[in-house]
Image: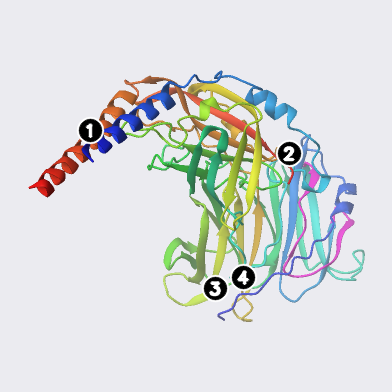
Amino acid sequence: MAAACLLVAVVSGAAAWWVWQAPARSADTGLTVAQAIASASPSLPPSAAPSSDAGADESVVALSPAMPAPGVVDPPVALSVPALGVSAEVVPVGVRDDGAMEIPRDGARVGWYRWGPEPGDVTGSAVLSGHVSTRAGGPGALLRLAEAAPGDVLEVTTASGDLLAYRVVGVETITKSVLPVDRIFARDVPHRLTVVTCGGPFQPALGSYRDNVVVVAEPIAP
Amino acid sequence: MRRTALITALVIPLAPLALAAPATASSTGEATVSVLHAVPGLTVDVYANGAELIPDFEPGTLTDPQQLPAGSYDLAVFAAGADPEADDPAIELADATVPAGANITIVAHLGADGTPVLTPYVNDVAALDAGKARLTVRHTAAAPAVDVRAGGSPVIEGLENPGEETLTLDAGQVSADVVLAGTDTVAIGPADVPLAEGTATFVYAWGSAEDANLALAVQTVEGLHSSPSGVPSGEASFQPVAWLTMIALVGLVGAAVAGRRTVSQAV
């Protein structure tokens, strides 16, 4: 029995080491975010085309307790990337006091930016983000995200049980200071899923990684 | 008195307004203009610079926003079907200024004393920080000063006709009511007001306290959202050596415990 436990320890350690050491598929493969965004522009139906100028959309709204809460209809509850063995619970998140996207403290969970589009919407970029690592030094849910490659399938499960499939079209590592947040969080583009985590070298003085890893995926027609 | 009217979403095309040239071309460019009819019990025709803009405009309705040449407009409101050449207007506003680039709502409503008036309000449609919503409350009712409460606590106090006050709030839904200033006497509501993220919501208290027809009208302007400033998704470095050591230690402890059990069983 003691030997069995030792074996477990050694095997699990070795497996984890292998995961960590597995040759990373090229960090910057496929399209850049800009390219993915540019290419992902099959025309929207005119009725769904968003208005370009802010403030153009007004309406009389009947005041009624029966009015549904705006936006969220069917939030995502799980993300998986079969090719990378990634599987994580998804929870809704908002904005931190400093204006950055909130990230779940639990490194095993992935956050969905609830103020933006949701997976399955017709327009806009639904954004998911989770830790690459936890404060305890363990692996976060999206540790292997940087290994994603064009063609990989991402699957999102929604609260109603729908399974939404996306295909990766671009993987890019971007320095955080120049992260194109307006494109990552765009609400007026054809629908896509954008998954973000951290990458690049860890900077102990700043307590964070230098880069963000950004994976852009387009919906696979059911 | 305790009453929340539902506003019918009747949209009046404002196309003829585009034909009404400004009385004076004070500046170039265009403005976004909506018109809200908030005078109870009076169906009207609205004229700008002598041209009919909105025929048979009914109380509690709001036009779609329209792009108009900036400038100044003479506005007149007649009882529906009246002859603008012969009859006196019910409400008049000369030289209403429509500045280029502005977003304006012109409201026909009752003054504090019950006299119908036209008030142009400039809508704050500046971009909001991520996660935020803007709420503007406008007192356009024949009623005394009011407080507006959200979830039971006053957030706006002593608002008088035709005053307005604007708050920036976390997005969400608020249960709002309107009380006579400094009292718990509810004049309107409560009503659940959704404050969608990145949206400006303009709430109008309108009608007449005396006639017991106070109500709320709501106008929203969407698309004012901003993106979060960043995505801080790595709080500490992944340390495979430390992490593997920990896993191995757990395994060793397990082995030790199991070993002891084996020994004790052997004894």
Q: Residue B163, image x and y in percent?
A: 56, 59
Q: Secondary structure beneath disc 1?
A: helix
B215 sits left or right of A14 in the view? right
From the image, state whether disc 2 or disc 1 is nearer to you: 1
C-alpha gap between disc 3 and disc 1? 63 Å
Does residue B67 belong to the magenta stretch? yes
Q: Secondary structure beneath disc 3?
A: strand
From the image, state whether disc 3 or disc 1 is nearer to you: 1
B43 sits left or right of A204 in the view? right
Return the residue at label 4.
A64
- At horizontal 85% and vertical 57% (from top left) the residue drawn is B13
Label 3: chain?
A: B
C-alpha gap between disc 4 and disc 2? 29 Å
Q: Give the camera-side residue of B124 and A194.
A: A194
Q: Quadrant of residue A19?
A: top left
Q: Residue B195, image x and y in percent?
A: 56, 56
Q: Residues at marks 2 and 1, common chain? A: no
**A36, above or below B77, in the image:** above
Label 2: chain?
A: A
Return the residue at label 1.
B249
**B255, above or below B158, in the image:** above
**B164, above or below A129, in the image:** below
C-alpha gap between disc 3 and disc 4? 10 Å
- At horizontal 55% and vertical 35% (from top left) the residue drawn is A195
Kindly identify the amino acid type of the residue bearing the numbered disc 2: Ser
Return the residue at label 2.
A52
Kindly identify the amino acid type of the residue bearing the numbered disc 3: Gly
Kindly identify the amino acid type of the residue bearing the numbered disc 1: Leu
Label 4: chain?
A: A
